[in-house]
Amino acid sequence: MTGSTLDSAKTVLNHHHDAEVVAAHGAEHQDFRLLGIIVFLVAEGMIFLGLFMAYLTFRSVATEWPPAGTPRLELLLPGINTAILVSSSFVIHKADTAIKKNDVKGLRLWFGITAAMGAVFLAGQLYEYFHLEFGLTTNLFASTFYVLTGFHGLHVLFGLVLMLGVLWRSLKPDHYNSKSHFGVEAAEIYWHFVDIVWVILFLMLYIL
Amino acid sequence: MNDREPLTFLMTQAAEYQEQANLVARGSEPDKNDWRKYFGFSTDHKVIGIQYLVTTFIFYLMGGVLATLVRTELATPASDFVSREVYNSLFTVHATVMIFLWIVPAGTGGFGNYLIPLMIGARDMAFPRLNAIAFWIIPPAGILLMSSFFVGAPGSGWTSYPPLSLMNGKAGELIWILSVLLLGTSSILAAVNFIVTIFKMRIPGMGLNQMPLFCWAMLATSFLALVATPVLAGAMILLSFDLIVGTNFFNPTGGGDPIVYQHMFWFYSHPAVYIMILPVFGMISEIVSVHSRKPIFGYKAIAYSSVAICGLGLIVWAHHMFTSGTPPWLRMFFMITSMIIAVPTGIKVFSWLATIWGGKLRLESPLLFAMGFISLFVIGGISGVMVASVPWDIHVHDTYFIVAHLHYVLFGGSVFGLYAAFYHWFPKMTGRMLNETWGKIHFALSYVGFNLAFMPMHKLGIEGMNRRIAEYDPKFAALNLLCTIGAYLLAVSTLPFLVNVCWSWVYGEKASDNPWRGLTLEWMTTSPPPVENFDADPVLATGPYDYGMGSRATEVNVAFSDASDPVLSAGPSSTLRAKPDPAVAASPSDRVGESHNR
């Protein structure tokens, strides 16, 4: 291509596109972080799905499940725990509603309550661990029980860290407002995810 | 260089529109290419792409050294070069390095990172910092894996099947698990980034069906990595519990079930085959069209077949387990799905051949490697359909037939494709051309060396030579020696490439913005592109493969009848105008046709 072609075409194009060029330089792309979180949760879901399928295969292949001599699981404490975790999903949604109305105090209140519910859930889980009559290596059922609930418990713990992070950041003036509150939404979606996983886990381990 | 000069005159009309329409978008000057930025935490997708490529290539060389050691041991039937335990570690780490530290990160992280934002006209990936984090997980994970040789490297194969993997050295096995977990995490993070980038960051006017085919391939690959890798992580978690605290998930002596590990492992590791080959399919689609100067044949067929492979790839895994006591009905299901995968793959091969057919071929290194890829991959594909068939698989399972098959797919396929991509995009990445003569020498050596090394393995496998064993029946000695000679040739073939890259990066002939006269957007900016790729958002004046298509007056919204422009104001028969591509002129139906993806 000759130099003259380049130059003249550039002049012509400049004439048409100047305004757009300036606009493009100033513009940052949209915020895709929430979509990123959702896509990432697909991967998280697949880890759990893989572990669930492993559990179901162990169970279907075994001649007796749980293996003979495994003490029965108590339902009362895990039942209460489930109720707490499921209702915390509704509580955390109140926080989202609050921040959409620019109500940072409401955000702190509802996030605080959700975090407390999560902490109670974890405490209940630990209490159950210490009072069960089987250990991690007792048999295949015991191992899957501890690994599945423990892996989920780690996710609950991480959710607590996220909520404390949001609470800490909400102390900064105007960090979250009705227009910009990615952290709040991300923590909420993550919490719903952890909640759904628990419901499946509870049905699989305790009820089925 | 003289043989490249006529290219200027082969410029098709479409290439002209695309370049002229994007003159404003073109970066004002090439990037300075300061070498120091490659050693730090950069968030520029191009720096990260090159970091991936260089890092993974170093691991490829390490894996190659391990392979050479394996072949040296196998040169004679006796176990005389290394001990059996070391031999086990050599092939285990060889496979792990080649898969997790070379092909997967080079194809997705390397070329994907470098090309995707450029091809869709974006300034960077959707999450630049996440991108950098995904890369920086790789070097420590790789060093960790290689360091396992100091404590007794893992020796139960890259599949790490329990209970075998629970019976060897614990330290090596744990290191293996940890590095696979790290590399898997990196792969998942990269996949999240690609999916969001491809869906959300395309320039206005580029719908999914206007994307270059490499973007389709990366979309399918990223989806597979996102969905399949976590299940491998799940298997690794359970395996590490068995290893460290003595649970019995996979240990039959304690009531566990090793088959569950195999299911979880192959649920990832079969799709991993597609994670390794799909990006290369995408690269080949780009390269074949550009270097044949013809529109790609069957754009939508190639694009959607990537998606079909992605879907089918998730439901074929148990064909690796036909001999693991899998019930007949399950074998039947997985046999049928595995064979169906040959259909979308065949569609791609057919489309590439139809693209090459009647084109004006530019037989330089990129196209040579691309054609080498097609020929070798077809062999691997056919042996793949053979082993998908249950009775045949039972005969050749765990023999050298499988070793031959997987190397035809992963070396003849993925690595030849990666080489083609290196030759094709090196000018864009560095602003320098690679030396063509050395490129051809590299191709000849690797093509001959590869076939010498792996073709005889088909026969060895059918005759019953088991894989993964340091010793073999002396009747296999002659063919094994041939394989070893081929492997040495293959090892030597890397040297011309290495020298060529290092020399050309510094002293190579300067590359123009668009040395191959391509139409995709990465060629519409400087070589190498500036930090934010384009000065303005690029526009699509033509489809990505409209070589020799369209009419000058109607396709571009630019005043081409500018009287001050001698070229544009000249009549259509003026010598100032680019001559039409002879290949396209020979078959006018190609030229007047509507673009398939506009």
Image: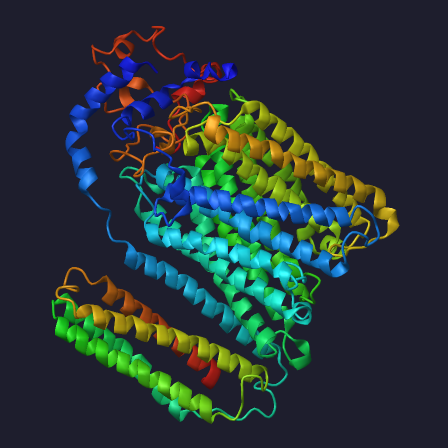
Q: Position of residue B219 (x, y in %)?
A: 42, 48
- The residue shown at (32%, 69%) is A190
Q: Residue at x 56, y 91 (%)?
A: A70
Indicate the quadrant containing the C terminus of chain B: top left, top right, bottom left or bottom right: top left
Relative image position of residue B563 (x, y in whole percent): 20, 10
Let me know if residue B296 appears in the view: no
Count of residue discs: 0
Q: Tell which of A177 and B332 is nearer to you.
A: A177
Q: Position of residue B235 (x, y in %)?
A: 55, 68
Choose top left, top right, bottom left or bottom right for residue B564.
Answer: top left
On screen, residue A110 versus residue A55, left or right, reads: left
- At horizontal 44% and vertical 29% (from top left) the residue drawn is B427
Q: In this rendering, would B199 be left or right of A113?
A: right
Reply above or below: B204 against B582: below
Q: Nearer the viewer, residue B28 or B398?
A: B28
Residue B532 in view, yes or no: yes
Asked whether, in this view, residue B93 is left or right of residue B72, the answer is: left
Task: Name the image quarter holding residue B376.
Answer: top right
Residue projecting furthest to the right: B475
Above or below, comparing residue B586 to residue B302 in the picture: above
Residue, x 68% and y 54% (percent of image)?
B91
Q: Colour scheme used in the picture?
A: rainbow
- The percent coordinates of residue B257 (x first, y second) are 63, 74
| A18 in relation to B345, above or below | above
